[in-house]
Image (spheres, grey):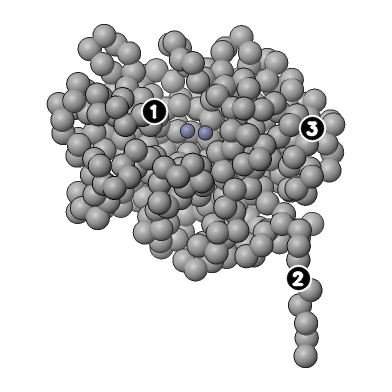
Amino acid sequence: MATEVACTVMNWTNYHMHTFYCDGECTVEEHARKATENQMLAIGFSSHAPVPFQSDWHMKQDDLGAYLQDIKHAKELYPQIQVYKGLEIDFIPDVIGPGDFEEYKLDVIVGSVHYIGQYADGTHFCMDFTAEELARGLREVYAGDVQAMVCAYYERVQMMVRYDPPDIIGHLDLVKKLNKGNRFFDETQTWYKEIVAETIEVIANSSCIVEINTRGFYQGKTTEFYPSKWILELCFEKNIAVTISSDAHHFSELENNFAEVAELLLSIGYREVKVYLNDVWTSMPLLPNGLKNLT
Ligand SMILES: [Zn+2]
Ligand SMILES: [Zn+2]
């Protein structure tokens, strides 16, 4: 009887991680060192890109050079893994988007919608900060209309995918982050399913990759990963490529819940995920305990 040798090494990739340069809790080097210890295949840094207004969780424009330099240094220091430079770039129509960072020749861009409108004083409404902030934005920016607020989020995601597409769409259904116990809306409502399906259609017509982002789950904020299983099933039906990431803000989070994600993806029907290796996006077979390195 043939026996299979259990593979103990989990070769993962992760292109979504934050550092001290934004709201992360460790250095570029610490992430790279841990990723090397974990025998990861590749990592991509994606600190929050600078925004043209006051923020305490985005990188300062003046730090961008040092950040990229640190990544270059980590690449030299840890040749055993592939280290890539990237940013998580906010998409705010007419304010900022992935296309604004072309000059930095980034390897991997995560594009995310965190802001969905402005208060009367012009400050931007961040919808994933606290439940209180979300309730304030709902009241002041959307006059209490939850459906309008949630649809505005997805309309912005669609706009980004159509007009300023990133490589990876960050936490596709982030709008559910502060919705535990259906505090604001119910994911099974028809209008919600419709706006999500419409968004999936737009993504299917692009070359964007959807990430399965485990952060909301391991932080105990959401009961599922981003995006929810039923949304991933729609992605699978529409042949949308996926990648696995943890949105790590500390090196201890680099592979959080990845085995569970693999199990989920395999149960849906996915057999491969997208990885950025040797400077190109390519597909790699997905196994329950990691990616099958064919090189
Ligand atoms: Zn984000
Ligand atoms: Zn992030």
* Real-space CA distance between mark 1 and mark 2, rounded to the nearest whole angstrom: 42 Å
User: Element type at marker 1?
Assistant: loop
Residue at 28% across, 18% down: 118
* Residue 107 in picture, x, y percent from top left: 65, 34
| Mark 1 or 3: the one toward you | 1
Choose the circle earlier in sequence order: 1 or 3: 3
Q: From the Cβ of disc 1, is ligand 1 less than 8 Å away?
A: no
Give the amino acid at mark 3: Lys
Give, as a three-letter code, the residue at label 1.
Answer: Phe
Task: Judge whether residue 190 can be spotted in this image.
Answer: yes
Mark 1 or mark 2, earlier in chain: 2
**Above or below for 64 versus 265:** above
Instruction: Give the residue number, with chain letter if any, for mark 1.
Output: 129
**Spatial distance from mark 1 to mark 3, Cα to Cα?**
33 Å
Q: Are marks 3 and 2 in contact (CB under 8 Å)?
A: no
Q: Residue at x 24, y 40 (%)?
A: 184
Q: Quadrant of residue 135?
A: top left
The label nearer to you, 3 versus 2, is 2
126 to the left or right of 69: left
Question: Which part of the image, by quadrant, shows the C terminus?
Answer: bottom right
Residue located beneath label 2 in the image: 6
Q: Which residue is mark 3?
A: 75
Q: Quick check: can you spot residue 167?
A: no
The disc, 3 or 2, on the residue closer to the chain's N-terminal end is 2
Image-quadrant location for residue 26:
top right
- Identified at 79% across, 74% down, the residue is 5
Q: Position of residue 293 (x, y in %)?
A: 74, 58
x then y, percent, for residue 162: 39, 37
Mark 2 closeness class: few <14, some 14–19, many ≥20 residues within 10 Å: few
Secondary structure type for disc 2: loop
Observer-nearest of 149 and 241? 149
